[in-house]
């Protein structure tokens, strides 16, 4: 019996993953290896699926008759941008052109034609090769259910194989064509084969007879073929244009070049960072290399850690965004743990930031317990780890590390775990520590002997009580403070130089009148109370003023004009809205959400591949978005506040500030997002939409706030003279001294 027959006759009628033999190993890989035709309907097709195909590729490519036909969702990758565009027009011809344009762009995204070819991997080249040789054809679909005008997400999950001698196998299952779905998600698949009647099923004869061979196979194959051809009522199928296919051929490697690349990437890679042959986990090790360069702390980091120790291990590290606060903190942990075993608790505001800490810690052989996402991740693991630590089951150089988010930190169940810590040997680290001042958050941190706060802007304007609480818990700022100017002027340079371009936008009469109303309310209540805090009425009015500025109609006109001038090869972040609370964002009840949709639609219109990155997206979705952004399959993120703090996106080269923030921390943090060093990035660009009154009867509260931001943003820019000229003109125009 040949290998094909072994696969075909022994495949189970039901498959379920993950398992030792998951769906990829049991069905997809051998199916592709032996088939003539693989037809697949899927909600999402990800390039990661190719990693499942790779073991089958040698035989698949040798087979002259082999082909993969993939029908995937058109709207599954860029939120609802295409749907928004379709809703704005009633013209069917225009709708068709939008969909054709989007289908083409979706294929360009998936083939990474928008990215630098020098960064393509074997999988990138394999996909291009399959398309160029017509071994793979991709079409994109949307659905129009009866009675519903707006297109909906295509979400079919089915497929079939046709093998030599016309044997057939069809399957139904709730998994997409991606590595994560095929390998990791516990999906169940039903399998139907043309040889079903001849296969033994033990006592399950009823089920065997229920899945009739020819009837079921023919039904599913006919249905899938009908959809592929665009004949299925309610399903619209769109091909891509010939120009893109010609471009794919241009970049495609030859078969020998592709094989050589695969062999090169399959060579075992040595870990140059850490030799862990006999080293126990969670025994900290300083890596010899970090992100491709020799690892060594910079002068300001070494001095800060020395002064932290001299201050009895208390203090706040006030260093510019991107200057290495996280690495400084981890090196501090390593230094302390060398002397005796320790416990470290690291608390951060967002799950995305927590994930980055986990990755960075592993570079130092520290494997933390993830105390976030689901409580299932930590509810049992964390107490077991503490019990092991307290019972002295570990060596003196061992460290137990718990990474959590502020929400979980306040959970009574987690507080109970913290109560078991040996506080004399505990390190408490608060990242973006200024956030603790807003809700008396330091009370949830353990009364640890070692304490370290991290923030580029640790203290909140107008909150004397909160600022004092921070100092009471963490201590004062650790010298030296490390400013943006320090980082830009350092040798070697710590951050990327940037160009700053202010763009004038004017409130209309209606917007300006609403702004003045809220400005009057803010002025009436602004005086601080006895505790040094701004009254809620004034804070609410200021938030509304910010919303009015952020939603200024002229900003979207100016953005439409700006987009064609930007380089799409430079990854960009578009910051919208700044007057809402986190709760507002979660509920999407404010104008900020409308602004996000407007920006997303404009980006789609101008040919950008964007994704929204807000509190609305779930954790796994945000991870996927950041991965796609990092890989280059998305070239723009549209965000409100989630990207303001901590999250590392070093490749981004453009920041567009649509929110006219008067909050210094906010615009400083947003500037910092584009200044991180990255290969092939020599210069960053910041476009700041300046909100101005409609006439020369200036509003001091509006003009002065915008002027202060311009001064701050231009101070360290590479084109300071240009910004100074702009500022001078604005001040003369509005008679500002």
Image (tube, rainbow, N blue to C red):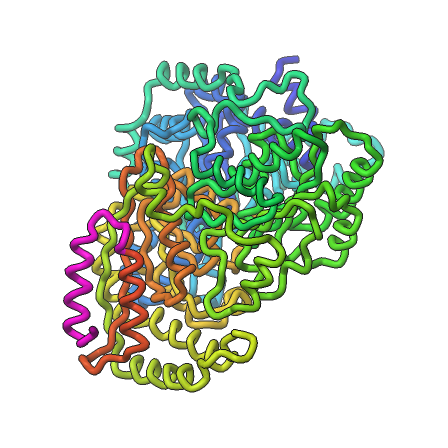
Magenta-highlighted stretch: main secondary structure? helix
Residue 142 showing in the rendered view = no
- Decide which of 505, 4 is in the foreground and name it: 505
- Percent from the top left, x then y, of residue 315? 56, 49
- Percent from the top left, x then y, of residue 650? 40, 41
- Decide which of 430, 550 is in the foreground and name it: 430
- Residue 237 in the image: above or below residue 632: below
- Residue 703 in the image: above or below residue 188: below
Determine if the magenta segment contains residue 98: no
- Quadrant of residue 602 within the rendered picture: bottom left
Q: Quadrant of the N terminus?
A: top right
- Decide which of 279, 47 is in the foreground and name it: 279
Residue for point 58% across, 53% down: 475
Specify start and end residues of the magenta stretch as a single range. Answer: 714-737
Residue for point 53% across, 80% down: 529
- Residue 124 in the image: above or below residue 685: above
- Percent from the top left, x then y, of residue 344? 67, 42
Q: Quadrant of the C terminus?
A: bottom left
- Percent from the top left, x then y, of residue 14? 70, 36
């Amino acid at each position: 019996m040949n290998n094909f027959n072994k696969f075909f006759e022994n495949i189970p009628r039901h498959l379920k993953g993950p398992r030792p033999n998951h769906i990829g190993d049991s069905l997809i890989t051998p199916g592709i290896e032996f088939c003539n035709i693989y037809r697949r309907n899927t909600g999402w097709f990800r390039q990661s699926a190719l990693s499942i195909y790779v073991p089958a590729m040698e035989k698949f490519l040798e087979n002259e008759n082999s082909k993969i036909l993939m029908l995937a969702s058109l709207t599954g990758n860029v939120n609802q941008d295409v749907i928004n565009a379709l809703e704005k027009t009633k013209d069917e011809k225009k709708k068709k052109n939008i969909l054709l344009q989007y289908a083409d762009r979706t294929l360009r995204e998936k083939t990474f034609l928008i990215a630098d070819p020098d960064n393509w991997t074997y999988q990138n080249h394999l996909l291009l090769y399959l398309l160029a040789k017509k071994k793979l054809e991709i079409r994109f679909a949307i659905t129009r259910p009866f009675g519903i005008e707006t297109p909906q997400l295509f979400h079919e999950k089915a497929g079939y194989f046709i093998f030599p001698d016309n044997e057939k196998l069809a399957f139904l299952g709730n998994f997409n064509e991606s590595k994560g779905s095929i390998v990791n998600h516990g999906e169940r698949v039903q399998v139907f084969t043309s040889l079903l009647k001849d296969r033994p099923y033990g006592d399950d004869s009823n089920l065997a007879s229920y899945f009739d061979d020819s009837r079921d196979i023919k039904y599913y194959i006919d249905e899938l073929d009908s959809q592929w051809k665009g004949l299925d009522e309610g399903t619209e199928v769109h091909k891509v244009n010939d120009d893109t296919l010609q471009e794919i051929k241009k970049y495609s490697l030859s078969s020998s070049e592709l094989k050589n690349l695969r062999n090169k990437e399959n060579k075992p890679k040595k870990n140059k960072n850490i030799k862990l042959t006999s080293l126990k986990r969670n025994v900290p090790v300083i890596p010899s290399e970090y992100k491709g360069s020799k690892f060594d702390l910079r002068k300001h980091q070494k001095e800060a850690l020395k002064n932290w120790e001299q201050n009895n291990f208390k203090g706040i590290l006030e260093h510019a965004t991107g200057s290495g606060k996280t690495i400084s903190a981890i090196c501090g942990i390593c230094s302390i743990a060398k002397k005796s075993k320790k416990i470290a608790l690291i608390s951060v505001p967002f799950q995305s930031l927590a994930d980055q800490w986990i990755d960075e810690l592993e570079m130092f052989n520290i494997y933390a317990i993830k105390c976030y996402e689901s409580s299932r991740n930590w509810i049992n693991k964390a107490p077991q780890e503490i019990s092991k630590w307290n019972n002295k089951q570990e060596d003196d150089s061992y460290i137990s590390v718990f990474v959590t988010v502020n929400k979980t930190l306040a959970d009574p169940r987690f507080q109970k775990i913290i109560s078991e810590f040996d506080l004399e040997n505990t390190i408490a680290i608060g990242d973006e520590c200024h956030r603790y001042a807003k809700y008396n958050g330091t009370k949830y941190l353990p009364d640890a002997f070692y304490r370290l706060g991290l923030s580029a802007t640790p203290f909140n304007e107008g909150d004397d009580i909160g600022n004092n609480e921070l100092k009471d818990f963490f201590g004062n700022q650790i010298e030296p403070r490390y400013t943006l100017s320090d980082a830009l002027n350092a040798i070697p340079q710590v951050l990327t130089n940037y160009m700053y371009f202010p763009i004038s936008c004017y409130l209309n009469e209606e917007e300006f009148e609403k702004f003045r109303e809220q400005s009057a309310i803010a002025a009436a209540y602004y005086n601080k109370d006895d505790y040094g805090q701004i009254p809620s009425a004034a804070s609410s009015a200021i938030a509304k003023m910010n919303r009015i500025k952020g939603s200024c109609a002229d900003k979207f006109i100016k953005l439409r004009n700006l987009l064609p001038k930007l380089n799409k090869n430079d990854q960009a972040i578009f910051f919208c809205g700044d007057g809402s609370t986190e709760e507002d964002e979660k509920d999407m009840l404010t104008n900020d959400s409308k602004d996000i949709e407007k920006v997303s639609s404009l980006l789609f219109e101008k040919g950008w591949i964007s994704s929204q990155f807000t509190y609305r997206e779930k954790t796994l979705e945000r991870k996927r978005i950041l991965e796609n952004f990092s890989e280059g399959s998305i070239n723009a993120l549209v965000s409100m506040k989630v990207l303001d703090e901590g999250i590392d996106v070093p490749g981004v080269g453009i920041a567009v500030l649509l929110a006219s923030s008067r909050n210094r921390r906010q615009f400083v943090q947003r500037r910092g997002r584009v200044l991180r060093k990255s290969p092939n990035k020599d210069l960053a660009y910041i476009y700041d939409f300046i909100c101005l009154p409609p006439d020369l009867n200036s509003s001091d509260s509006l003009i002065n706030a915008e002027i202060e931001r311009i001064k701050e943003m231009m101070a360290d820019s590479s084109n300071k003279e240009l910004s100074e000229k702009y500022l001078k003109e604005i001040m003369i125009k509005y008679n500002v001294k």
